[in-house]
Amino acid sequence: MSCRDLRIWQEARVLSVDIHRMTITLLPKFEMFEEGGQMRRSIKSVRSTIVEGYGRRRYKPEFIRSLTYSRASCDETTDHLETLWETASLKDKPLYEDLHKRLQTLGKRLNLFIQSVERGHLTP
């Protein structure tokens, strides 16, 4: 099994691509480099930290720590998205709602996966 088989990684991958595209095509130029850049880094951190944690899955505390960092990056990405919406830098309401919902779902799945690992599963 690979980390790429994990649903949380798959969802983070798709979200990172969608958010990357949104931040370079729909945002005003100044936001593309400011809030957009922060948002690209935080969502990419979600997926890469899942990969890093999976690579350390034999060490349960390190696996949980990495997944917790991934969850925090998911929250950070949500905050950046909300800021873009609140400042009217992102004006596409259906896109905002879709990305927001998907980030919330990913966060919930990360929480459930962390709980599963905490209960004793050494491998997913």
Image (cartoon, rainbow, N blue to C red):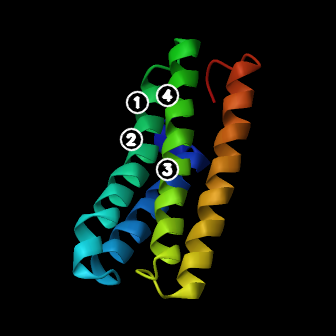
Name the residue furthest right: 119
For marks 3 and 4, give the one nearer the viewer.
3
Q: Which residue is tagged 4?
A: 66
Marks 1/3: CA–CA distance = 19 Å
Q: Do labels 2 and 3 touch, CB within 8 Å?
A: no
Which amino acid type is shown beneath numbered disc 1?
A: Glu
Marks 2/1: CA–CA distance = 6 Å
Q: Which residue is tagged 1?
A: 52
Numbered tag placed on residue 28 in the rendering: none
In terms of sequence position, does the residue under pointer 2 or pointer 3 come before the other? 2
Residue 49 vertical placement versus 94 (above, below): above
Q: Position of residue 70 (x, y in %)?
A: 50, 39
Marks 1/4: CA–CA distance = 7 Å
Q: Say few, some or many: other residues with alpha carbon within 10 Å of mark 3 (under 14 / 14 to 19 / 20 or more).
A: some
For marks 2 and 3, give the one nearer the viewer.
3
Q: Which residue is tagged 3?
A: 76
Marks 2/3: CA–CA distance = 15 Å
Q: Do labels 2 and 1 touch, CB within 8 Å?
A: yes
